[in-house]
Image (cartoon, grey):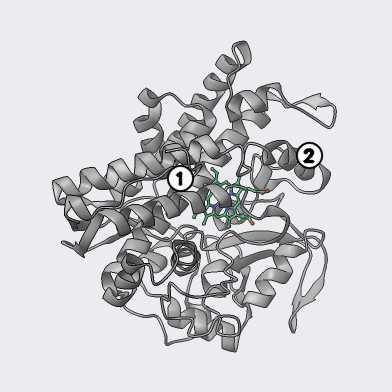
Amino acid sequence: MDTRPALDQGPLDAVDLADPLLHAHHDLGPLWRRLRDEAPVHWQPESDSRPGFWVISGHADVVSVLSDSASFTSERGNVLDTLLAGGDSAAGRMLAVTDGQPHKALRSALLKPFSPRSLDVVVESVRRGTRRLVEEAVERGEVDFAADVAAHIPLAAICDLLGVPPTDRQHIIELTSSALSTEDGLPDEEATWASRNGLLLYFSELAAARHDKPYDDVVSLLVTKEIDGRPLTHEEIVFNCYSIIMGGHETTRFSMVGGLQALMERPGQWRALKSGEVTVDSAVEEVLRWTSPALHSGRTATQDLFLGDQFVEEGDIVTTWLASANRDGRVFAEPDEFDLARTPNKHLTFAYGPHFCLGAFLARAELTALLESLRDLVAEARPTGPPTYVYSNFLSGLSSQPVSLTGEPAGSRAPLTSSAGGG
Ligand code: HEM
C-alpha cells in the first residue's frame, strides 16, 4: 500500500508535474485517474521557471503519440528536464533522441547485441549473480534491498554488456545514481553535471582503449561498426554508451525494489509466486506494469494538430505519462490491483513505437532472475524500516528499502538450473 498522501483534490492547474518533490511525496494514482477522466490531454501551464507542456495520461493517446514520430519528434529531448531546458545536446547522435533514418541505422546496429541469442552469456551470468546476491542477503538476514541487492544486478549486466571491468563498477554506480536523481529532492545542478561528465569521460576513455584493442562487447562493436557507410564518430559512441547505462540501471533497479515491496504488502501474491500458481513470466510483466519506473516519455510536436479535442501547436512539448497509462481502466481490469496472474498485460513500461526500449529483453531477464531467486531461496520477506522515495520527475522508485529476509531451509531450496539446460 502506498502510504504517501494521495493527491486527489484541488484544481489540476495547481499541480506541477515537473516538480520532483510532488512525485516523491505523493501517491499520484488518484491524480492520474482524474486527468484520464477529466482532462486526458491537459495543458500544464507555464511557471516563472519553466515553459508549459502537454500532459497525456490515457493508454490510447499515449500509444498514438509514441507511434507517430512524424508528428512528434524526440530530437529536442525525450525527458521533461531536457525538453524544458530547450533541447538535448546529444540530439541526432544518441539513439533515444534521434529520429528517422539515422535512428533506424543506429538502432539496427545495436539490435544484435541486445537480441536474446547474443545476450545468452550475459543472462546466464545475471542468473548466477542474482542468486548469489539473494543468498548473501538471506545469510545476513537484514539488508537494504535497494542498495545491497537490486543496485548490483542491472549494473553488473550492463557492465558485462559494455565490457566495463569489475574494478570500475562501484564508481559507475555512484556516477549513474547522482546523474539521474537526488536523495533529498533539492536540485544540485553542479553535482548532476559533474556526474554526467564523469560518465561521458569514462566511456570516452573506454572507447579509446577498445579502438586500439577491440573485445567482444558493445563498446567494441560501436567502435568498429559502420552505419550508413561510415564509422560512428567518437561522440556517437560515447553518447550511446551513456544512454545504455542511464537507460538500463536505475529503471530496472526501481522495478526490482518496487516489485519486492508490492509482494511484501500482499501475502496472497507472494504465496502465489512461491507455490508456482502464477508463472514468473506473468509476474515479471505485472511488476513492470505496477512499478512503471520511467514515468514519462517526452516529445515535441513537429506540426499543428489536434490531440483529442485540444489544439497542439508546432513546437509544443508533449509528455506521455506511462505510469498513468499503465493504470488505465479502459485497458486493464482492476488497474489498481497488483495481480501477478494478469494476462494479457499491455503495459507501456517500455514505451511504444520506434523508440520502444532496446533493453526490454535484458530487463525482463534480470527481473526473472530476481523473482526466481526470491521464490526459491526466501521463505519470508518483510520491511524493517520505511522506504525512501527517489526525487525525480522522470524516474519513480525507492532508493532505500530496509528488509529482513528469512531463508528457505537448505534442503527445500530449488537448485539453479541453466536456462540453456546445460547445468
Ligand atoms: C528506451 C524504459 C531497461 C536501454 C526506453 C524507453 C523507455 C524505457 C520508456 C523509451 C524512451 C522514449 O520513448 O523516449 C525502460 C525501463 C527499463 C529499461 C522501465 C527497466 C525496467 C533498459 C535496459 C537497457 C535500456 C536494461 C540497456 C541495457 C534503452 C535504450 C533506449 C531505451 C538504449 C533507447 C531506444 C531507442 O530510442 O530506440 N527504455 N528501460 N533500457 N532503453 Fe530502456
Q: Position of residue 91 (x, y in %)?
A: 69, 43
Amino acid type, mark 1: His
Identify the residue shown where x is 53% and y is 26%: 203
378 horizontally vs 262: left or right: left
> Mark 2–mark 1 contact, CB under 8 Å?
no
Quick one: label 2, few (<14), some, or many (20+) residues within 10 Å?
A: some
392 horizontally vs 69: left or right: left
Identify the residue shown where x is 59% and y is 27%: 219
422 horizontally vs 400: left or right: right
Q: Is residue 33 above or below residue 117?
A: below
Image quadrant occupied by the N terminus: bottom left
Displayed quadrant of residue 353: bottom right
Q: Earlier in the sequence, mark 2 or mark 1?
A: 2
Q: Which residue is mark 1?
A: 249
Direction top: furthest residue: 212
Q: Position of residue 162 (x, y in %)?
A: 53, 30
Q: Position of residue 164 (x, y in %)?
A: 47, 26
Identify the residue shown where x is 74% and y is 64%: 67
Q: Position of residue 379 (x, y in %)?
A: 21, 61
Residue 177 visible to an observer of this rendering: no
Most foreground residue, 317 or 265: 265
| Local SS, label 2 | helix
Task: Confirm if mark 1 falls within 8 A of ligand 1.
Answer: yes
Residue 120 visible to an observer of this rendering: yes
Kindly report the distance in space between the C-alpha atoms of the residues bearing marks 2 and 1: 24 Å
Q: Which residue is mark 2?
A: 105
Amino acid type, mark 2: Ala
| Local SS, label 1 | loop
Most foreground residue, 330 or 286: 286
Task: Confirm if mark 2 falls within 8 A of ligand 1.
Answer: no
Identify the residue shown where x is 38% and y is 37%: 173
